[in-house]
Image (cartoon, helix red, strand yellow):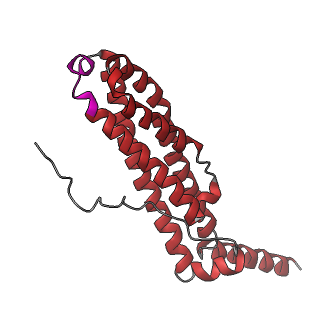
Amino acid sequence: MVGTGLRIGLLAGLLSLVLAGCGINNVPTLEERAKAAWAEVQNQYQRRADLIPNLVETVKGYAQQEREVLTQVIEARAKATSVRVDASTITDPAKFREFQEAQNQLSGALGRLLATVENYPDLKSNQNFLALQSQLEGTENRIAVARRDYIQTVQAYNTELRTIPGRWIAAILYPDAKPMEVFTATQGSDRPPQVKF
């Protein structure tokens, strides 16, 4: 009896090692990594959205005649923050595209605002503006890094879902697992910008 119990114990231990090493946990592990990377992307976009009102208020005092640009920034921020995202966004192409388009519009409006600032030398030397501009530039870099990290984790997850044995494991144990969306370049970004003097 002792020998049978020992054999069953050894067999159970061996079986658990084989199952742990065969990749049975890869799908949920990679999915959680991708979700965490997505949360970091959202975190950085929120940081940018939080900085924008202060930047707009600082510019307002100097650029009264630039109301249109300021209005575009405010409207783009409102639209970007009104697009609700959750974990399902990364597996829904339409929701993901809506989120990405709203963020791209905000990026474009911010770019126009910062270009407008060139007309105001006093504003360019204002300490509040310089600090906000520096924080915004840092945030844009953080967004780029967060997006890159998200793309890499989604690539690993999607690859696991599409290759064997991950494909079989997902079909059997995780039938709800769906490929996740990744960011794409904005239209026209493959061409260099035209500079006119």
Query: Residue 95 lies in what quarter of the image?
Result: bottom right
Give residue 61's position: percent from left, percent from top. 37, 16
Q: Is residue 62 magenta?
A: no
Give the overall secondary structure of the magenta segment: helix
Give residue 159's position: percent from left, percent from top. 49, 74
Q: In the figure, 108 relative to 128: above or below?
A: below
Residue at the image position 35 percent from the left and 61 percent from the top: 187
Query: Residue 10 lies in what quarter of the image?
Result: bottom right
Which residue range is magenta in the image?
116-125
Residue 126 horizontal side relative to residue 74, left or right: left
Q: Nearer the viewer, residue 143 or 112?
A: 112
Residue at the image position 41 percent from the left and 26 percent from the top: 56
Q: Nearer the viewer, residue 86 or 164?
A: 86
Residue at the image position 38 percent from the left and 21 percent from the top: 60
Query: How many numbered callouts?
Result: 0
Residue at the image position 27 percent from the left and 28 percent from the top: 117
Q: Can the viewer see residue 30 in this picture?
A: no
Q: Is residue 117 magenta?
A: yes
Q: In the figure, 91 relative to 135: above or below?
A: below
Give residue 81's position: percent from left, percent from top. 55, 41
Name the image quarter holding the N terminus.
bottom right
